[in-house]
Every structure is written in structure tokens, then in C-alpha cells.
Image: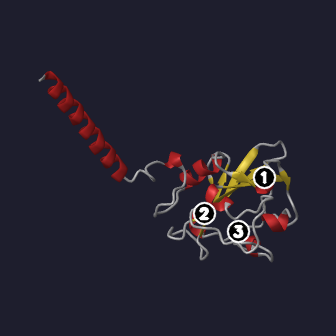
């Protein structure tokens, strides 16, 4: 008798656990906090999400597979003397074996490209991000949300501008889906 009660109690606990997991799985927890960074869910990306995403380096691939600082080139519209660029796992699918963007690439939805803008003293001055989210109301005609923030998270360029102020340079000959690393740092 006691073993049947033990079995029933264990089965009851197991059933509660299964129901809890099912409820948890059904919850949309992908965009509940700005500390999680940008997600691929619908809605507007916020400056806070841009900043949190900019600080993430885990799971990213560096341009040319190197996190070394790259000196500013004549084609850069940024004032900082150094930069380095990294790609999330979705965007990194568009990199070739040497870590350069493949010619003719069109980045997939969910791609995130982060450019660190570095001062002469090697401190980060800000971040420029391209985030492929076609459904975002702030996305440009190509589906990119353009994020530009300081090292402390303040907005440097309005998200609602849809890249105006950036697209001019990012449209020069040789760009690949608005990216310029192959052009400016071949």
C-alpha cells in the first residue's frame, strides 16, 4: 500500500513538472528585457537593446578572423582612428574562409554586424550596428536597422532615421548589402 502511495506521489510530482515545462515553453520570453539585447521578434529595437547587443562578443566572428584594431581609412565616415568589426552567427554565414564578406552576399534576417569605434588611447568610443530586421518600423528599404551609440549607451544617431546620415557612405561602389569592410579594409 505504501509503495503505491509513493508511486502516486512521484507520478503527481512528475506530472506537475511536465505541465510546468509545457507552460514555460509556451511563454514568449525572447524580448522581455533590454539586457538580453536585440532579438529577432517583431517590434521596435530600442537604444537600450542596441547598447546591450553592442557589448556582446561571445558567439561573434571578427572580420578577417582577427580582433586586432584596424586603422581608419580615407573611406570611413567615422572620426575615431581605429575600429574593428564582428558578426553574429547568422551574419557570419556570409563570411568566406578568410573572414571577409562573400561577394554578392545578402545578409539574412537576424544578422547583426557590430563595428567598435576606438579612440587613439585604445578605449571604445562607440558602436555602429547593422541589424537585419525587415519588420522593424525603423528598418530601411533593405531591412537594416542602423544603430549608433556611445560607449555609455547614449544615442549618437536616431534609430528612426533609417540610416540617413550613414547610407550615403554605405552606398559607395563595392558595398555588399550596405557593408563596407571589403571596400575599406580589403
Q: Nearer the viewer, mark 2 or mark 3?
A: 3
In-image side of 87 versus 132 (left or right): right
Mark 1: few, some, or many residues within 10 Å (few <14, many ≥20)?
A: some
Image depth: mark 2 or mark 1 in front? 1
Q: Which quarter shows the C terminus? A: bottom right
Question: In the rendered image of this protein, does residue 1 appear above or below residue 157?
Answer: above
Residue position for label 3: 166
Tell me what residue is drawn at x 22 percent, y 35 percent.
Answer: 11
| Quarter where residue 76 is shown | bottom right
Residue annotated with mark 2: 158
Sequence-earlier tag: 1 or 3: 1
Query: Which image quarter is the N terminus in?
Result: top left
Question: Can you see residue 81?
Answer: no
Q: Secondary structure at mark 2?
A: loop
Q: CA distance from mark 2 to mark 1?
A: 30 Å
Give coordinates of residue 44: x percent, y percent: 49, 62
The residue under the point 64% across, 48% down is 59
- In x, y percent, where is residue 156? 66, 57
As drawn, 174 above or below 99: below
Q: Nearer the viewer, mark 1 or mark 3?
A: 1
Q: Are marks 2 and 1 in contact (CB under 8 Å)?
A: no
- Name the residue nearer the viewer: 1 or 49: 1
90 or 54, nearer to the observer:
90
- The residue labelled by disc 1 is 65
Callout 3 secondary element? loop
Residue at the spot x=14%, y=22% of the render? 2
Q: Between disc 2 and disc 1, whose residue precedes? A: 1
Amino acid at each position: 500500500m505504501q509503495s503505491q502511495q509513493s508511486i502516486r506521489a512521484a507520478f503527481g510530482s512528475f506530472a506537475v513538472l511536465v505541465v510546468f515545462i509545457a507552460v514555460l515553453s509556451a511563454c514568449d520570453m525572447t524580448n522581455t528585457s533590454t539586457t538580453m539585447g536585440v532579438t529577432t521578434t517583431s517590434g521596435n529595437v530600442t537604444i537600450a537593446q542596441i547598447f546591450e547587443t553592442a557589448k556582446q562578443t561571445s558567439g561573434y566572428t571578427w572580420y578577417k578572423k582577427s580582433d586586432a584594431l584596424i586603422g581608419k581609412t580615407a573611406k570611413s565616415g567615422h572620426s575615431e582612428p581605429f575600429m574593428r568589426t564582428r558578426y553574429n552567427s547568422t551574419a557570419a554565414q556570409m563570411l568566406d574562409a578568410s573572414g571577409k564578406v562573400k561577394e554578392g552576399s545578402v545578409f539574412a534576417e537576424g544578422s547583426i554586424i557590430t563595428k567598435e569605434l576606438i579612440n587613439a588611447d585604445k578605449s571604445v568610443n562607440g558602436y555602429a550596428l547593422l541589424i537585419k530586421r525587415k519588420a522593424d518600423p525603423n528598418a530601411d528599404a533593405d531591412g537594416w536597422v542602423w544603430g549608433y551609440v556611445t560607449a555609455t549607451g547614449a544615442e549618437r544617431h536616431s534609430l528612426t532615421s533609417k540610416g540617413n546620415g550613414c547610407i550615403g557612405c554605405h552606398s559607395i561602389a563595392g558595398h555588399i548589402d550596405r557593408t563596407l569592410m571589403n571596400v575599406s579594409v580589403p
